[in-house]
Image (cartoon, helix red, strand yellow):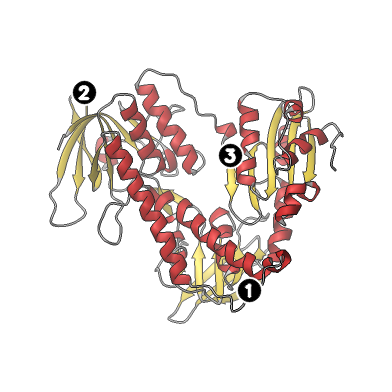
């Protein structure tokens, strides 16, 4: 096996495997090292996103949404069902199959692009003339350690879930995102610490399947990162669905037993509260994966929060060493990691790429979906930026009525003087797809009038995006 490369990528998550593929496209000799492993011992490239994050969570969200629709909404369409049931192990097996297909798809792409794949754990083994030497430790005792050399090294090792200080993950009662995705039966009482993306999505899955779900959020405001109007609408809709959400919570004690998890916390008013759950999902953030890299030995600098320190171009303090994705500053999003990975290798090829953090979209795949790009109203107010807003509910959209999902709205924010688009905020059906109109508009420096003048197909949900742009000038046609 070849052991000298132009580029070695440590990690095969979204940032890593995409960087490796783009590097190969540009003519570099590329190696990618990853320690993801399936239960059968075979490689599991794709990182958290593919294996225990984005992809499997969407599979369970889709399954649970079908079940919820069959229970609550099929009758509206004249569809009658008897003896409706959910086979949770079969649902989990479908999720596992999708993950496996994605793993195998990445390995196929490596082969197609002539990327040398090493299955193991990579660590720096010192400098080598013109680059770096890496050691790859095997994942099983029947394999030997390997050594490779590369001119450039890209670190894309991702992140891991953060545990509560006094309650380690045990994969039985106290669960991280991986445990939440592997439950084989619906818990009667489910507690979720953290009402962010993971908490809301996992809470939604198991609520639809019959669990009593309580979310405990430390921040005083629900979804404080989202536009305030979207957050208020989301809180109302989630409460109507049966999710119980407490904000301003401080967890003081967690005790796990063979039968349940007991949680003690103070509420927003400072009163002591107690709750018991069959399972407790903890989703309070993630920490960068830097252990095992031998970073200290080679002098790789970390910042005060433990992330690899990089400049705006993802360069570390070491020559020819780069880092992307969750292991560096910025939002922990798969698509952000991908963009950084591509940008790094294009810089190596002498190109001038750019990653615009201001146009990275955010999505929460609940029902209804929540998505946004750009500034929120509260951010614009805090910055003293004069703006105008236009908002239209999906209730005014014919396609939404036909779908039977008229919850939520579309909201544009534009500069009061120039009319340049500053943000797009959506809560409603297919928000994850519709938000891309805002991303494109902001990338091209468009005005809200530009959006309002574009012909949108009828009947589509996208018409609401146009209507909201028209609403900025008080000339919405269907609302």
Q: Residue 383: percent from the left, percent from the top?
A: 71, 33
Distance CA(mark 3)–CA(mark 2): 38 Å
Q: Which residue is mark 2?
A: 130
Residue at 55% x, 77% y: name it: 188
Earlier residue among tags 3 and 1: 1
Residue at 80% x, 33% y: name it: 470
Q: Which residue is mark 1?
A: 81
Earlier residue among tags 2 and 1: 1
Outermost right residue:
474
- Secondary element at image label 2: loop
Distance CA(mark 2)–CA(mark 1): 68 Å
Task: Kindly identify which numbered label has been placed on residue 306.
Answer: none
Pair 3/1: label in front:
1
Q: Are marks 3 and 1 in contact (CB under 8 Å)?
A: no
The quarter holding residue 247 reads: bottom right
Classify 414 as above or below 251: above
Q: Residue 227: percent from the left, percent from the top?
A: 70, 45
Q: Which residue is mark 3?
A: 361
- Secondary element at image label 1: loop
């Amino acid at each position: 096996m070849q052991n000298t490369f132009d580029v070695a990528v440590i990690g095969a998550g979204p940032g890593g495997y995409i960087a490796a593929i783009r590097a190969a496209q540009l003519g570099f000799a590329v190696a990618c090292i990853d320690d993801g492993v399936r239960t059968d011992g075979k490689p599991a490239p794709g990182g958290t996103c593919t294996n225990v994050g984005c992809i499997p969570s969407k599979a369970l969200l889709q399954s649970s949404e079908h079940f919820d629709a069959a229970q609550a909404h099929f009758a509206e369409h004249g569809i009658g069902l008897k003896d409706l049931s959910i086979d949770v192990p079969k649902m989990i097996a479908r999720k596992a199959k999708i993950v496996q297909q994605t793993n195998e798809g990445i390995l196929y792409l490596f082969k197609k692009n002539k990327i040398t794949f090493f299955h193991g754990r990579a660590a720096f083994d010192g400098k080598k003339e013109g680059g770096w030497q890496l050691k790859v430790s095997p994942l099983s005792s029947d394999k030997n350690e390997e050594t490779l050399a590369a001119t450039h090294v890209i670190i894309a090792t991702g992140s891991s879930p953060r545990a509560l200080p006094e309650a380690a993950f045990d994969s039985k009662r106290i669960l991280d995102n991986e445990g939440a995705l592997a439950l084989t039966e619906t818990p009667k009482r489910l507690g979720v610490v953290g009402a962010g993306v993971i908490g809301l999505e996992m809470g939604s899955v198991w609520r639809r399947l019959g669990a009593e779900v309580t979310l405990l959020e430390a921040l005083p405001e629900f979804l404080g990162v989202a536009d305030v109007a979207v957050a208020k609408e989301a809180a109302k809709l989630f409460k109507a669905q049966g999710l119980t959400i407490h904000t301003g919570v401080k967890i003081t004690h967690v005790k796990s037993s063979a039968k349940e998890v007991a949680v003690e916390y103070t509420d927003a008013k400072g009163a002591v509260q107690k709750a018991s759950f069959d399972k407790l999902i903890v989703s309070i953030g993630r920490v960068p994966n830097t252990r095992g890299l031998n970073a200290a030995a080679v002098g790789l600098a970390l910042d005060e929060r433990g992330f690899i320190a990089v400049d705006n171009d993802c360069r570390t303090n070491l020559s020819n060493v780069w880092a992307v994705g969750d292991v560096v500053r910025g939002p922990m999003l798969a698509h952000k990691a991908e963009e950084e990975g591509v940008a790094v290798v294009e810089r190596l090829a002498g190109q001038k790429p750019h990653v615009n953090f201001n146009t990275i979209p955010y999505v929460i795949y609940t029902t209804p979906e929540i998505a946004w790009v750009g500034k929120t109203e509260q951010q614009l107010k805090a910055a003293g930026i004069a703006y105008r807003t236009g908002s239209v509910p999906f209730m005014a959209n014919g396609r939404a009525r036909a779908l039977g999902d008229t919850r939520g709205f579309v909201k544009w924010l534009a500069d009061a003087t120039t009319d340049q688009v500053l943000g797009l905020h959506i809560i409603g059906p297919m928000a994850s797809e519709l938000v891309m109109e805002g991303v494109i508009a902001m990338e091209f420096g468009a005005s809200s009038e530009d959006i309002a003048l574009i012909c949108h197909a009828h009947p589509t949900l996208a018409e609401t995006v146009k209507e909201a742009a028209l609403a900025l000038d008080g000339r919405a046609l269907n609302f």
